[in-house]
Image (cartoon, rainbow, N blue to C red):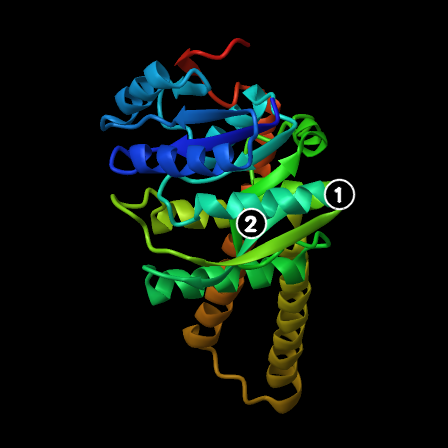
Amino acid sequence: MQISVIIPIYNEEENIDLLYKRLTGVLHDLKLTYELIFVNDGSKDKSLQLIKNLIKQDTEVKYIDFSRNFGHQIAVTAGLDRAIGETIVIIDADLQDPPELIADMYAKIKEGYEVVYARRKKREGESRMKKFTANAFYRILSRITDVDIPVDTGDFRIMDRRIVDELKKMPEQHKFLRGQISWIGFRQTYVEYDRDERHAGNTGYTYRKMLRFALDGITGFSDFPLKIVTFLGISVTGFSFLVLVYVLLSRFIWEDYAPGWASLMLSILFIGGVQMIAIGIIGEYLSRMNSNLRQRPLYIVRESNIGK
């Protein structure tokens, strides 16, 4: 098997047939033996039935059906666990990432690169808020981590089998695959493209899921938030000491001390707020450690036509 294509699916019934036609067209032009692995991540529409219809006409179409929705990164991970190709492609089903770009990315692999990712020049069909938050997140992440995570990229990429084998050794419950792939290293490059707007349907990435995804990326690849907590602790301690000196001087030296609740309340609220922020940040790290210690399976498969 020369190439495996992994497609996470969540309510994509309007896109599956067109995606299949465009993917197979590219792969036939490249004259590659292939497998298409659709990972149904708890879809509530007819996505799974459409995938099963494709299997009747193409034996190279494979599928994994989850018992419930486990999330995009876990769906991709399941595909990586079952893929057998020498090279592996990750692509979403919404057709914002053009399947035709796989030809250029595969050419880079043949030049000797182990990872080729698609970097966006433009992003059509997305709100200004989503573009702003995405740009801000990746640029902040690049500054606070030691890993060179490329900006303006998603999960659309092609990888050598060796990269996938290394990914399988990473047991994290909270996956941030683009960060893990960057952390692995080897020779990586990119191909630029203009990202289209979604072909049909609605995105499953709500702002809530985007925030959770951002937290997974930051806590998985940076201890900078913990350093902020330490800095805040030192700053608050210094501030409290100065207030203490001022109170003592006012009471015993200047003798203009006027007792009141305003300064007391301000100090309590300020210190309490910093403590709550610190506890929240530490809690995020502890929560992720707890998830890994439980060692639950990342996903549960309801049915599949791929052997274990």
Position of 29 with respect to 223 (left or right) is left
Q: Residue at 73% of width from left, 45% of height from top? A: 111
Pick the residue in front: 71 or 224: 71
Report the Cα–Cα distance between label 1 and label 2: 41 Å
Q: Position of residue 185 (x, y in %)?
A: 75, 44
Q: Residues within 10 Å of mark 1 (few under 14, many from 20)?
A: few
x and y percent of residue 221 in the render?
65, 47
Report whether residue 219 is seen. Answer: no
> Which image quarter: residue 3?
top right
Looking at the image, which residue is at 59% across and 40% down?
A: 158
Residue visible at 35% across and 67% down? Answer: 128
Q: Horizontal placement of 10 versus 262: left or right?
A: left
Q: Is residue 211 above or below residue 160?
A: below
**For the residues carrying marks 1 and 2, which lies nearer the camera in this image?**
1
Q: Which secondary structure lies at badge 2?
A: helix
What is the number of the mark on residue 8?
none
Which quadrant does the N terminus fall into? Answer: top right
Say which quadrant the C terminus sits in: top right
Image vertical order of residue 57 relative to residue 105, above or below: above
Placement of 208 over or under 121, stated as above or below: above
Q: Secondary structure at mark 1?
A: loop
Tag 1 residue: 112
Tell me the kind of residue under disc 1.
Answer: Gly
Looking at the picture, tell me which residue is in the foreground, 50 or 78.
50
Return the residue at label 2.
Answer: 281
Circles 1 and 2: CB distance less than 8 Å?
Answer: no
**Vertical relation: 253 (above or below) 138:** below
Crowding near the residue tagged with mark 2, few <14, some 14–19, many ≥20 C-alpha atoms within 10 Å: some
Mark earlier in primary sequence (1, 2): 1
Query: Camera-side residue: 216 or 74?
Result: 74
